[in-house]
Image (cartoon, rainbow, N blue to C red):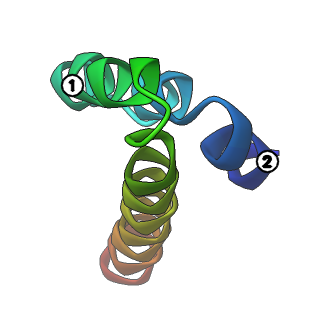
């Protein structure tokens, strides 16, 4: 579900993983048509990093 959110509403996905400042910056990127693609790529990358961090915490915890 977060992956779909990362593609269509990248700024909102940042808020779901606890990065509101990045979400605001991403929203500013998304306002421009040209910035939509970098915002979506950034959002998907941040989501993959979040999932990796969660797996590491689970393995160590």
21 lies left or right of 43? left
Q: In which quarter of the image is residue 31?
A: top left
Say above or below: 12 vs 7.
above
Say above or below: 8 vs 38.
above
Q: What's the residue at 41%, 45% (across, down)?
A: 39
6 lies left or right of 19? right
Residue 25: assigned label: 1
Q: Which of 57 and 18 is in front in this view?
A: 18
Position of residue 4 measured from the top left corner of the image (x, y, whole percent): 79, 47
50 lies left or right of 24? right
Q: Which of 21 and 57 is in front in this view?
A: 21
Image quarter hosting the N terminus: top right
Position of residue 50 measured from the top left corner of the image (x, y, whole percent): 40, 60
Q: What's the residue at 36%, 69% (across, down)?
A: 49
Q: In which quarter of the image is residue 22?
A: top left
Camera-nearest label, 2 or 1: 1
Kindly check if marks 2 and 1 are in contact, taking CB atoms under 8 A apart as contact.
no
The local secondary structure at tag 2 comes to helix
Q: What's the residue at 34%, 69% (across, down)?
A: 53
Q: Which of marks 2 and 1 is nearer the N terminus?
A: 2
| Label 2 packing within 10 angstroms: few (<14), some (14-19), many (20+) | few
The local secondary structure at tag 1 comes to helix
Residue 4: assigned label: 2
Residue 15: assigned label: none
27 lies left or right of 8? left
Instruction: Please give the count of numbered marks on the rendered protein.
Output: 2
């Amino acid at each position: 579900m977060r992956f779909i959110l990362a593609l269509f509403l990248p700024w909102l996905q940042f808020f779901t993983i606890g990065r509101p400042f990045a979400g605001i910056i991403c929203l500013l990127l998304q306002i421009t048509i040209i910035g939509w693609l970098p915002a979506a790529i950034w959002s998907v990358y941040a989501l993959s990093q979040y999932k990796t961090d969660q797996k590491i915490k689970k393995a160590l915890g």
